[in-house]
Image (spheres, rainbow, N blue to C red):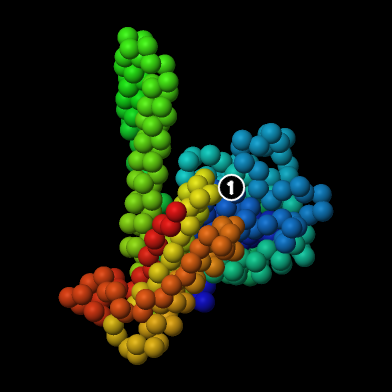
Amino acid sequence: MPSKVRVYGKAQNRTSLGIMHAYLVMYPQATVEDLRKAFPKADINPDSGMSEIFVHESDPDYKASSGWFFEKDDEVLVLQDGSKVAVCMMWTKASFDRLVKHAKLYDIEVAEFEKGQRGEKGGFRLEYLNGYVPPVAVVKKSNTWLWILLAALVVIAILVILLLMKGCQKPAEPQIVEVEKVVVVHDTLYVQQIEEIEKNFNAAEFVQGKADLSESAKFVLHDLAKIMQKNPQVRLRLEGHTSAEGDADFNQKLSEARAQAAVQFMVEHEGIDASRLEAVGKGSSELKNTDDPMAAENRRTEFIVLE
């Protein structure tokens, strides 16, 4: 695929810092775990004396990293939650070449070093290529008030039940009702999470004739994987769909490829067991927009929760 971002640097270690900043621009919702997964130390190995490529401000050795990591305000990576991540500044020529090669996996390319003036501080700059426009991080609205309200309702219900139990001398009954209340709260939040993820995922359309996942679809699948990790009983069926244009046999195979692309991402990138996932191709048999069979919104992949 054509490169999306080009990094210009005036020094080897500053260029490596530019690569990390470019990745965070392309994936603004990335966590420090996502960064470590995207640039694994085992594959890149910046220097034999370095234990990590990234150090989060919550790590015990963050303050002790002076001289080994970029730590100034204009150098550190700032995550979506406002926390800071320091990037390793010790790069040998061999490890830097491995980093440059690895960055191509994310459509990031590195230009030749720019010449700086004597005494000038090394730096980097980014250039967006081929019409690429960086995504804007989506800030999810806080649901803290909802948690507080639900918790208050549960507490009130428990108090009422305890009073009734005391008057009727039925100690076993309130325990049963209390458990049911807690389960209802959990199930309601779980359903809301699934519905929100499903809405965002179904809105991610495919390029005509392609089975490549969009970046927005990958982030939604990442959120979906977190739900599956917390709920091991959940299984999913991913269904691929196409618009009605073109050959029916081709559309069927393309829809299967789109569903399989989502399954492969969940298994290889998110660590979900393949036995919990199904891939089904529907071709153009179930159009989302029946008034316009050729509409782009018909090129999609949807998921169904199986429990």
Instruction: Give the residue at mark 1.
Output: 32
Is residue 28 something that shows in the picture? no
Q: Residue at x 24, y 79 (%)?
A: 293
Q: Residue at x 41, y 27 (%)?
A: 176
Q: State whether residue 287 is above or below residue 168.
A: below
Q: Residue at x 50, y 47 (%)?
A: 231
Q: Position of residue 250 (x, y in %)?
A: 40, 87
Q: Using the rendered view, name the quadrant where residue 252 is placed.
A: bottom left
Is residue 203 something that shows in the picture? yes
Q: Position of residue 38 (x, y in %)?
A: 61, 58
Q: State whether residue 214 is above or below residue 248.
A: above
Q: Using the rendered view, name the quadrant where residue 47 is placed.
A: bottom right
**Element under label 1?**
helix
Q: Position of residue 191 (x, y in %)?
A: 36, 46
Q: Residue furthest right?
A: 48
Q: Nearer the viewer, residue 31 or 249?
A: 249
Which amino acid does the dot numbered 1 rest on?
A: Val
Q: State whether residue 241 is above or below residue 121.
A: below
